[in-house]
Each structure stands twice: as C-alpha cells, then as structure tokens.
Image (cartoon, rainbow, N blue to C red):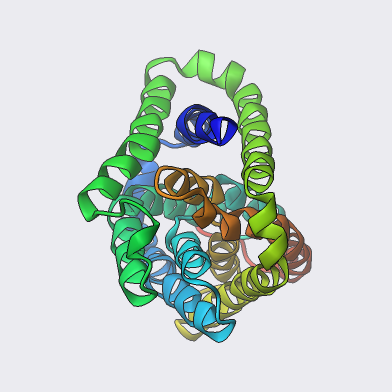
Amino acid sequence: MEDTSVFTAVALPIALAVIMISLGLELTRADFRRIFVYPKGVAIGLLNLAVIAPFLAFGIAELFDLSPVLAIGLVLLGASPGGTLANLLTHLARGDTALSVTMTALSSVGALIVVPIYLNLAANHFSGSDIGDISMLGVVVRVFFITLVPLAIGMYVRERYPRWTEERRDQVKKAALVAFVLVVIAAVASEIDVLLDNFAAVAVATLALNVAAMTVSFAVAKLARLSDRQATAISMELGIHNATLAIAVAGTINIDLAIPAAVYSGFMFVTAGLFARFMARRNAGAEPAPAPA
C-alpha cells in the first residue's frame, strides 16, 4: 500500500505535469483562435470528444457488464481529452494536424468541466458512490491543478523563452513519452491482482471503446461533409485519449479506476497506428488542408 500511495501522491502528478508541460510547449494562442478558422471541424471534433466518446463508454460498460469500479473507470477514460500522441499520428496519417492540435488544446481545457460531469454521472449510474471522494468540486480542483496549471506553464515558457523552447522541445517530448510509459506500467503493477481477475472483460471493453470511438467519429465527420484529412484528425483524437490524465484522476480517488485507462493504453497504439497507415495512403492524393490564419 505504501508503494501505491507514493505512486498516486508523487509519481503520478509529476509524470502528468511533464506531459502537460510538453503539450504546452507545442501550443500558442493561435491554436485556440483557430476555432474561427475551422469552426465546423472543431465543433464536430469537440462534440465527438465531449458527448459521443463518453456515452459510448457508458454503453460498452453496460454491454460487457463491467463491475461498478471498472465501468466508472471506462467512462472516466471516455471523458478524457485527446492526447498529444494524437497530433503525431495525425501528422503521420497526413491528416489535418492543425485541427488536431486545436482539438487537443481545447479539449484539455474543457476537461475541467467534462471529466467531473461524466465521472459523477457514472458514479451515480453504476452505484459506485462508495469508491471514494468524487465530489464535483473536488474533481474540478484536481483536474485544474494536474492539467491546466502545467499546460499554462508550458505555454508561458514557449512564449517567454522561444529559443530555449526550440532547443529543448525534443528532449521534453522524450521525457513525456518516458513518463507516460512509466505511469502505465506503474498503474498496471499497482493493481496487478485486480487486473488479472478482470483482464478479459476490461481488454475487450477497452478495445471495443477504442475501435467504436474512432469509427463513429470518422463517420460523423464524413456525414458532416468534412474532408478526409479533417475526419482523420477527429478520429485520431478519439482514438488517442489522454490516458495519463484518466490514471492521475483515478489515483486521487481509487486506483482501481485506472485499470481501463492502463489497458487501453496498450491497444490504442496498435489500432491508431494501423488506422494512420491506412489513412496515410488515402490522404496522400488529397488536397492539402488550408493554412490556418
């Protein structure tokens, strides 16, 4: 228990801070203003992130009859914003990288509202009120300090020290990747018994969420008459959630809630990587996305 306590109280916040600072170093104010350049694409993408993904998580948790704590953890994952790796995979898939970055930026800020709302809805729906302190205000404060504060620090550093940022950006990216891997490994190791007892159900449920979210979001984007490049960015954003945020929030409540996010982290690279490879060929002949203002 002591090791788990150190992990949740010290290692998790530090790791997530590194990841969010890394994201902040990639962002500028223009990334937030770009909503006025691609209003339709951003609106569709954020609708997918804020509504479709969480409710898909609700449905899949019910479909696979997950235990309350795992069901709530799956919804927490579904409500989490897109991750920075979505931007990289969108670029590799020749998708609209600018749109991807904008969605990641806006959804990371929106997590302050989206994550607490769905976490409370899930706790009430799955009767998981005994899993720990999940008061709305408490979760809002946690999300604020573990996401928005380091994100703002990263953006401030980039604006204030552009030369230093340019020289150190790759190093910070590598540190963020290492932090992500260590968080996932530690989350799995800390709850290995619970994970082994529920691995089959959690594995199938998280894989189903990953594939369903990417498929539905791509279909919605195409029905809205967005380009393949924009649909690729939106689908990637739904396929690569910020699992570290989900694990960090879970760690402040009940570490068992982190199991779906930890398992999901293993699948999302495979499915999103295959999708990126397929879309890279499809997008190769498409017209390039318009340059942002």
- 210 on left or right of 142: right
**Residue closer to the observer: 200 or 215:** 200
| Residue 198 x, y percent position in the rendering | 67, 67
Which residue is painted at 51% across and 14% down in the image?
Answer: 163
- How many numbered badges does the structure rendering display? 0
**Residue closer to the observer: 45 or 141:** 141
- 120 on left or right of 174: left
231, above or below 168, in the image: below
- 159 on left or right of 138: right
Name the quadrant containing residue 197.
bottom right
Viewer can see residue 151: yes
Which residue is painted at 69% across and 50% down in the image?
Answer: 192
Which residue is painted at 58% across and 61% down in the image?
Answer: 260
| Residue 209 x, y percent position in the rendering | 59, 73
201, above or below 178, in the image: below
- 277 on left or right of 98: right
| Residue 60 x, y percent position in the rendering | 54, 80
Q: Residue furthest left?
A: 137
Quadrant of the snapshot with the N terminus: top right
Which residue is painted at 30% across and 64% down in the image?
Answer: 120
Viewer can see residue 272: no
| Residue 196 x, y percent position in the rendering | 72, 60
**Residue closer to the observer: 22 or 88:** 22
